[in-house]
Image (cartoon, rainbow, N blue to C red):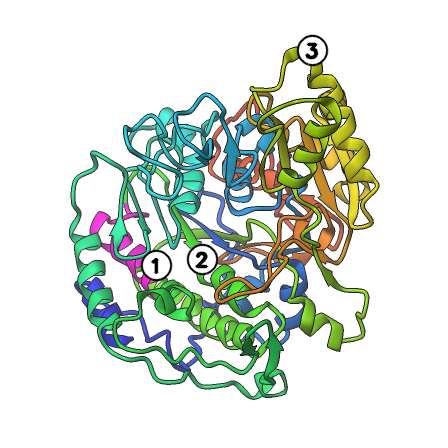
Amino acid sequence: MKALLAALLVTATVPAVAQQMPVPAAPAPSPAAKAPPKLLVVISVDQFSADLFAQYRDKFTDGFARLLQGAVFPSGYQSHAATETCPGHSTILTGVHPATSGIIANTWLDQKVGRADKLVYCAEDERVPGSNHDDYTPSDLHLKVPTLGDLMKRANPASRVVSVAGKDRAAIMMGGHNTDQIWFWNGKTVATLAGRPANPVADRTNQAVAALIAQPQTALPVPGYCARLMQGIAIGSQTLGAGRFERAAGDAKAFRASPALDGAVFAMAAGFIQDMKLGQGAATDLIAIGASATDYVGHAYGPGGGEMCVQLAQLDATIGAFFATLDGWNIDYEVVLTADHGGHDATERQQTRAMPMETRVSTDVSAKAVGAAIGKTLGIAGPVLLSSDGDLYVSNDVPAAKRDAVIAETVRRFKAMPQIAAALTAKEIAATPMPHTPPETWTLTERARASFYPGRSGDVLLLLKPRVTGIPTPGPGYVATHGSPWDYDRRVPILFWRKGMAGFEQPLSVETIDIAPTLAATIGLPVTGMEGRCLDLDGGSGDSCR
């Protein structure tokens, strides 16, 4: 991996991320700076749950260890019910819930769109002829609000905003509408939005990554604390739990679900900081970094196995190397690290760990089958219910006079199923006031309200009971998931660090929508319309929010 990272930086190199690395010492504490930081570094580790953070926090020795010296909020909340990648990333730098940003899920249905399946992807422009939600043009079209980066550039056009990630939806939802550079892994190469010009850093990234993928990857080292987790377990047709990310030459899919993806993203981020001289101008700059590999690893192997342990050890080293590089450039930066959602381990592994009640969702929980039964009962020909994950939509083919009956019968039938916690109608969700109490106290309807957007959300929302995994049959790349309204998917860490700050830990709940107003306060940027609150990062008598 050294060759990859060296290729991305002109005058400096980041240490390798695919092997054990020396631990760079954190900068010596200095008096807390009064001036705004010159660079905001916003890191989202996809699927990094509060549970994973708690499991590994005493094992971290590098990048995460430095963050633990700052302001630590171990009980951050992605408060909404739709704990998916797109909604989660949309909260981090907008300061608003998905109900306001419009990003209710990764996909939703639009029955007016000219597609057979009617699905729309959160980060696409479905107006492009011939596109579909799998083959699409990435776009910020559906994000209805500005990000912090947008507001920074609006206040001072000299601010530069860069967003890079292992997923397009992560880069777009954190970067916003007016990024100077935005790049993401599309499964084959690093790409950008339509109409954006090529960039030397992106070109070097693609050349270096292509060279890396062309070579086989040998097994990564296993830290001593991971040894007890390296146990194979049968999950569907696979035996998982003891993998070390060996990869055959040319296997781009395996590259994506490995620590190497994060290494490439952080190296690309460092390349942009160097080439654009971020953090060295008159105005504060911002770089958003979406570390996506943890999510791919979690889905493919489950977050409770040895693969995740190795992944987090590698990520700890990668982040530490990135920080050391910024230190070497003498950049005054403030960093925040959080996650877009949590995650739940594979059912089969959970059952071996004192959780025999863990189960996978039954194939009976089917909008198609229930819709067909309702159609037969009510005398409706053709499709009755359409679905996108837990959102159910009454087909436009259903006569208007029968829509209410269809909704009522849908709720009745699903509520009778033993794996369903709630079947909420759009009317009752919309009628629920947006909650302002601590997020752990919210009802299911309040959680649903935080990610409900009229015109995009379904007519009925289904929520599974706790410990019911929404994957009926596990398969390669998809054995565990997230997306529930339960705290194992809602709770994420939120960590702030800046050189010289007096660190502290606050175990009570905060929200990811609090991040944007907190960062805005540290750079003296007045903001309005955000639903989050500023978190006081001064552990003493001062107040960083004033």
The residue at 44%/86% (across/down) is 221
- Of residues 334 and 89, the one nearer the viewer is 89
Secondary structure at badge 3 equals helix
- Circle 3 packing at 10 Å, graded few (<14), some (14-19), many (20+), is few
| Quarter-of-image position of residue 234 | bottom right
Residue 241 counted in the magenta span? no
- Quadrant for residue 429, please give it: top right
Among numbered discs 2 and 1, the one appearing first in the sequence: 1
Residue placed at 68% from the left, 41% from the top? 79
Q: Amino acid at mark 2?
A: Ser
Residue 72 percent across, percent down from the top left: 64, 57
The secondary element bearing badge 1 is classed as: helix
The part of the chain drawn in magenta is 264-280
Q: Is residue 279 magenta?
A: yes
Residue annotated with mark 2: 292
Q: How far is the residue under mark 2 from the one under mark 3?
A: 46 Å
Q: Which residue is tagged 1?
A: 265
Quadrant of the snapshot with the N terminus: bottom left
Q: Which residue is mark 3?
A: 401
Residue 531 seen from this side:
no
